[in-house]
Amino acid sequence: DDLSRKIESKIDKKLIFKSKRGGLKDGFKKGKVINEVLDKPTVMTLYKMITDHIISYVNGAISAGKESVVFWGVENNDVNVALKIYLVSTSNFKKREPYILGDPRFSHIKKGTKNLVHLWARKEFRNLTQCYEAGIPVPRPLHLTKNVLVMEFIGQGGAPAKSLLTSEVDEGDYFQAISIIKDLYHKAKLVHGDYSEYNIFKTDSGLVVFDLGSGVDLRHPNAQEFLKRDINNITKFFHKRGVSVEDPDELFEEIIK
Ligand code: ATP
Ligand code: MN
């Protein structure tokens, strides 16, 4: 730890946050982000990703949740990426336990495990990979180190694409949203677990689903209950927006049969 403190003191924070244009959004002062939002091990992880040439620098904050923050990062070849960082200190990972315990892919994890935060990041990465390989439209997973997940940036010029919530939607979007749930189930063998208008981008080339940290394997004992909830949530959303929707219970039976 003495060594890590030495390395840490040597980290030139300007190297990490090198915002070119506009940079950090309002309320994200550089020092504040680094010292209050990101803990020291995370700053070191970002620094290592830069010295390992995984990313070139971090260009600004996109979103700050209670349990994760998303940054706009830039790769060496100037390609934009999204960095999703799970916060170690503020996280209430008790809430997340039901989405990990019971998933046979993580069966070696014991109840009460401390570092669920790294595990959660690994789970989201793995879910993204399973989806990507199954041909489901998700941000392409690129890299994972500890609690920092690097993925394809969905959006333009550092601005994320709009979610369904903030977009105009039509019947075509509804069909796509439902076909994504079906493909998740039958092709990726996953249930999203937090499927909603907040976690689906609407892009010029169609819907893209993200925020897959809650996704569970079909063999999870609550998989069907989560699927039901996912179907209900998305059905409600499209119904509220005036799209004619299928009965969610029938849809559920149709998907699991
Ligand atoms: P949780 O729902 O568990 O609290 P979260 O909502 O904080 O997680 P996400 O939903 O994954 O985290 O991302 C938050 C926001 O960051 C999104 O609404 C979106 O605007 C932006 N974002 C996430 N992933 C990407 C991406 N791949 N490309 C561009 N923007 C992204
Ligand atoms: Mn989300």
Image: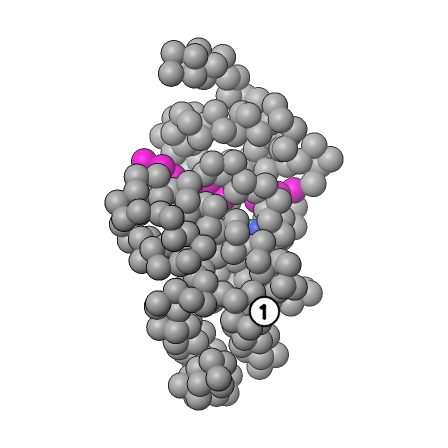
Horizontal and vertical percent position of residue 225: 35, 73
Q: Is residue 151 magenta?
A: no
Residue 4 seen anywhere in this rendered image of the structure: yes
Number of on-image labels: 1
**Quadrant of residue 214 within the rendered picture:** bottom left
- Ligand 1 within 8 Å of the CB at mark 1: no
- Quick one: quadrant of the N terminus? top left
Question: For the residue marked with disc 1, what is the amino acid?
Answer: Lys
Check disc 1: other Cα within 10 Å, few if <14, some if 14-19, many if 20+.
some
- Residue at x 35%, y 43% (from the top left corner): 116
Horizontal and vertical percent position of residue 139: 60, 54
Query: Which of 19/247 is in front?
Result: 247
Horizontal arrangement in the rendering, residue 187 relative to residue 122 (left or right): right
Query: Which of 239/184 is in front?
Result: 184
Horizontal arrangement in the rendering, residue 249 relative to residue 200 (left or right): left
219 w.r.t. 13: above or below: below
193 w.r.t. 256: above or below: above
- Residue at x 39%, y 69% (from the top left corner): 223
Question: What's the magenta bit mostly, secondary-structure-wise?
Answer: strand
**Quadrant of residue 53 within the rendered picture:** top right
Horizontal and vertical percent position of residue 235: 44, 79
Q: Residue furthest front?
A: 108
Residue 90 seen anywhere in this rendered image of the structure: no
- Residue at x 44%, y 88% (from the top left corner): 250
Q: Which residue is mark 1?
A: 187
223 w.r.t. 139: above or below: below
Q: Determine the secondary structure under disc 1.
A: loop
Query: Which of 238/75 is in front?
Result: 75
Residues rendered magenta in the picture: 80-89
- Residue at x 38%, y 11% (from the top left corner): 2
